[in-house]
Amino acid sequence: MIENPPSKEASPQGLQGLQVEPDLPAITPQRSLTGWHRELCVELLGEGAARIFVRAVQRSSLKAAELQRAILFHRLDVRFSDLQGCVEALRHELQRLAASARRELPSKANLFVSLTYDRKAWDAVEQGVDRWARR
């Protein structure tokens, strides 16, 4: 179950090709006890563009299903509170990730993933997000 789905009206925050939706869904202590958490999502839109948002989910997302929708996600630390600042700090890595994204038609060798991207850039984003939450 996903709560507070992102709006379709992302506001570019002066970051070329990156649309940031700054709203952070709240997770109450009671909800966190039942498994609710937040995920940072990067939707790779193509042509070097990406939409960045945070969503609240009750269960962790399934990687294969999200890749078919060109969405990468990373579970956020409960201390994470500044999406705008985090995106600005990781702008280079996020732009590199967005520029590397390519849609592919499923093939016999790869029936499920229709997206390729620079895995090192995504790893750098994940590590940067974790560092940002601990600062």
Image (cartoon, rainbow, N blue to C red):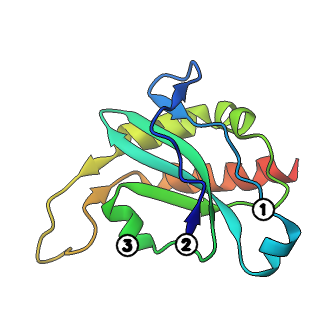
Q: Is residue 122 above or below residue 100?
A: below
Residue depicted at x 64% and y 37%: 90
In this picture, residue 16 sits left or right of residue 44: right
Residue 108 or residue 56, whichever sits in front: 56
Q: Which residue is mark 2?
A: 1
Q: Are marks 1 and 2 in contact (CB under 8 Å)?
A: no
Mark seen at residue 27: 1
Q: Amino acid at mark 3?
A: Ala
In this picture, residue 39 sits left or right of residue 96: right
Q: Amino acid at mark 1?
A: Ile
Mark 3 is surrounded, within 10 Å at the Cα level, by few (under 14), some (14 to 19) or many (20 or more) other residues, namely: some
Label 2: which secondary element: loop
Question: Where residue 84 sits in the image (x, y, percent)?
Answer: 70, 33
Camera-side mark, 1 or 3: 1
Mark seen at residue 88: none
Earlier residue among tags 1 and 2:
2
Q: Is residue 11 above or below residue 32?
A: above
Earlier residue among tags 3 and 2:
2
Mark seen at residue 64: 3
Question: Where residue 99 sits in the image (x, y, percent)?
Answer: 37, 37
Q: Amino acid at mark 2?
A: Met
